[in-house]
Image (spheres, rainbow, N blue to C red):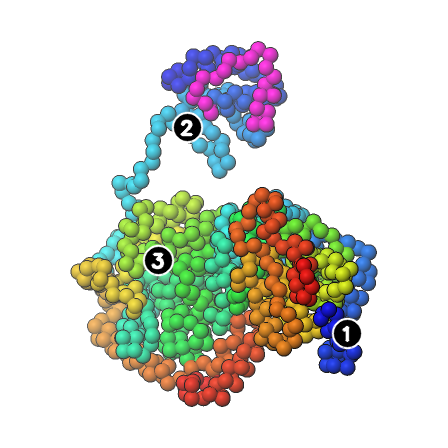
Amino acid sequence: MASTYLTKSKSFIIHTLKSKLHYTTRTSHFTNSLFHHRLLHTLSPLPPVPKHANYYSIGKDYVARRSHATTSASSQINQLPVESPSSQILDFPGGKVKFTKNMIFTSNSTEERVNCYRVLDDNGQPFTDDIDLLKINKELALKMYTNMVTLEVMDTVFYESQRQGRISFYATTTGEEAINIASAAALDNNDFVFPQYREPGALLWRGFTLQEFANQLFGNKHEYGKGRQMPVHYGSRKHNYITVASTVATQIPHAVGAAYSLKMEKQDSCVITYFGDGGTSTGDFHAALNFAAVLEVPVIFFCRNNGWAISTPVNEQFRSDGVVVRGKAYGVPSIRIDGNDALAIYNAVCEARKLAINEQTPVLIEALTYRAGHHTTSDDSTRYRSVDEIERWKGDQNPVKRLKKWIESKGWWDNVAESEYRSNIRKQVAQAIQVAEQIEKPPVADMFNDVYDVPPRNLNEQEAFVRKTVKKHREDYPADVPL
Amino acid sequence: MWGILRQKVGDTGLSPQGLGNQMLRLRPATSAVRDYSAATKEMTVRDALNSALDEEMAADPNVYVMGEEVGEYQGAYKITKGLLDKFGPERVVDTPITEAGFAGIGVGSAYHGLRPVIEFMTFNFSMQAIDHVINSAAKSNYMSAGQINVPIVFRGPNGPAAGVGAQHSQCYGAWYGSVPGLKVLVPYSSEDARGLLKAAIRDPDPVVFLENELLYGESFPVSAEALDSSFTLPIGKAKIEREGKDVTITAFSKMVGYALKAAEILEKEGINAEVINLRSIRPLDRATINASVRKTNRLVTVEEGFPQHGIGAEICASVVEDSFGYLDAPVERIAGADVPTPYAANLERMAFPQIEDIVRAVKRACYRSV
């Protein structure tokens, strides 16, 4: 084998050297390894060895840098038969690398895609015979299900209220209710959430009320954002839910930074951050995953691969096998799961959380799902995708329906409970909208504070000037803006 | 001639201007006493920054430094020298080459309560991260209605060095100075560097701290007070480096040194210039600048950055808004040439203000022939 690989001159050199340097003193480790390395690094014939060459001087610096490898290298040369260089190894920073005589370019795609973890099948029946995997009791299951229904109803009613002109904007989570609720259910309330903008379910799970949601949508004076942001940009410090920002994927490195902070404080919690398939194309995604792996921080990267980034389908977003394979590239443990299966999500996030905290490692979860609604109220997705496709996913793949089938099969739920619950929630949401609509908007003072911790003089002057102007020219300003 | 006449009128002390003169003369005097009392100790700006970082990190375990080459390499410009050995790799974090990444991570950690000091190798590279500086750091407190504050400091060399070409020489004072939610500081001397960096680290708002590479090696006298570990300078207050009554020269960073030298040259020609070291671009100390212009009636602004939409433009607008009646001559604005910085030494020299440019501008403002 080796003879095909080595030229004749090389084998001569090695044999000569081995006889001369084979069982030599420690100082010759360097020379052994020197030649070992030269062999490994070149396929072209070596120059003939000069008789009086000082082997120390040949590539001394080279050897010095590799000195950590000398002992293993020299032992290699003693033990390995020279006939099989293909099993010789390069001890490179990051780990040992085996050599091969075959020039193979890795393919741009694998024949088989990474498998997808699921617990319930399309009919809501356990996909596995191992019923221990279903570690969910009735209380938890019903809490998850009812929250998913609440989210679904809330989305429908708020969306309609935008269509009626009562709020300016809305983004639904239709099709992703399981991701929203089940992932939050697997976390602790102390775990920080860094959302994109399609995850109000995590807030809902943690106790954010329908009224609090409605207040933000109407930008009234009771909302925690003081009317500063567009609708659906929820944020609540007390629920450990970082305020939604419109910038795509900026929350991913933020999450890593927060996780670093947790690690420094040695806290028993983790950070989760959500983003879509589109967000994984950004520079921030790359930097964040890379850093998280290098810094070894407890963060869960949850990708909602819902097939569409506004009108860009995933095959125009990336050509990799989805997002899960990218984790490997960064050295991050990853899993692909069925994003419409609440139980699979719950299990996976539970496990990811344990991994993240116990081993202080980032984890990447790719949840395959479908954005059944439009991107936002500013979008009409039928313009770039077929109605059939949308209907198909709203049918059996619908996460709410699938979980419903399971809890019904367990005897925990039925259609009566269903219609009662839905009409109840519908009433509550409508009520919340009515109340939120009537509440006053934030006062002018809220326009100028929070820019800095303490308002600087120029802002105080500007505010005073605005008040004076409004008082003097009341007719130019809307009557319902409180001062 | 006209300038000298005005000078004499101002000296009577009877007009409100004269009273103002008295007041102004008192203030710089006391600060002069404070700054130069035990002035035998000298310190380079580099050591000033290093000592400030060291002390703040020792005092607050939440403060940490992150950036390229800050740890093992001891800092690209050796500002963070010794910190890795003293505080360990958890608090002095070497990063991969991704400004957007580590700026974003710094902001995220600040959301959670740490106090990061993010180093950009130069602020030219901050453009890779500018979305995080502005959209994630500057605006977060406002957008979250006070729920998320970002006590972060972004620091590094700003503006031209010597022979580093177009992509390493831009001044970002005007870019960051226009963003509400940020504070932008521009130290000149070692005392400025110490006091302002400490204040920046302790500040609950995001601060952009623009240093200057060529100043790092320059030595300045420091008072005993400045050496104390509790020393900070107020953010938003300019300093009158040199008192005068004929013309106001505003400058920041390296240009303060040039303005002072120009003032010495002008003194020999009978023009008494007041030099203001801005220290802070945002908030801009409009009060000090306007009070000075009301005293001298002439203004020359100096900066190394591009002229359009620059710091000088803002100062000029401020003075026109607040003290128009006091101006005896149009405002003279000196800035860098409106070109990407050339490399060749002769061209580079022509692309940035030199001492002679300042002298000539002052003379123009005083209606002297140049």
Q: Answer with left or right where residue A177 lies relative to residue B331.
A: left
Residue appearing at x 55%, y 60% in the figure = B307
Q: Answer with left or right where residue A200 lies relative to residue B364.
A: left
Looking at numbered disc 1 in the image, what kind of residue is underneath it?
Lys
Decide: is B74 above or below A2. below
Mark 1 secondary-structure assignment = helix
Q: Nearer the viewer, residue A339 or B329?
A: B329
Q: State which chain disc 2 sits on.
A: A
On whether residue B115 falls in the magenta region, the answer is no
Report the mark closest to the observer, 1 or 3: 1
Q: Position of residue A34 (x, y in %)?
A: 54, 22
Q: Which residues are magenta?
A: A40-63
Q: In 3D space, how far apart are the residues under numbered discs 1 and 2 (Cα atoms)?
A: 88 Å
Q: Position of residue B47 (x, y in %)?
A: 70, 52
Q: Nearer the viewer, residue A341 or B246?
A: B246
Q: Earlier in the sequence, mark 3 or mark 2?
A: 2
Q: State which chain disc 3 sits on.
A: A
Residue appearing at x 43%, y 19% in the figure = A44
- Neighbor class of circle 1 (other Cα within 10 Å; few <14, some 14-19, many 20+) is few
Q: In 3D space, how far apart are the residues under numbered discs 3 and 2 (Cα atoms)?
A: 38 Å
Q: Which residue is mark 2?
A: A99
Q: Kindly check if marks 1 and 2 are in contact, taking CB atoms under 8 A apart as contact.
A: no
Looking at numbered disc 2 in the image, what kind of residue is underneath it?
Phe
Quadrant in the rendering for residue A370:
bottom left
Q: Position of residue A365 (x, y in %)?
A: 37, 53
Q: Which residue is mark 1?
A: B8
Mark 3 secondary-structure assignment = strand
Asked whether residue A142 is in view, the answer is no
Q: In 3D space, how far apart are the residues under numbered discs 1 and 3 (Cα atoms)?
A: 71 Å
Quadrant in the rendering for residue B275:
bottom right
Mark 2 secondary-structure assignment = loop
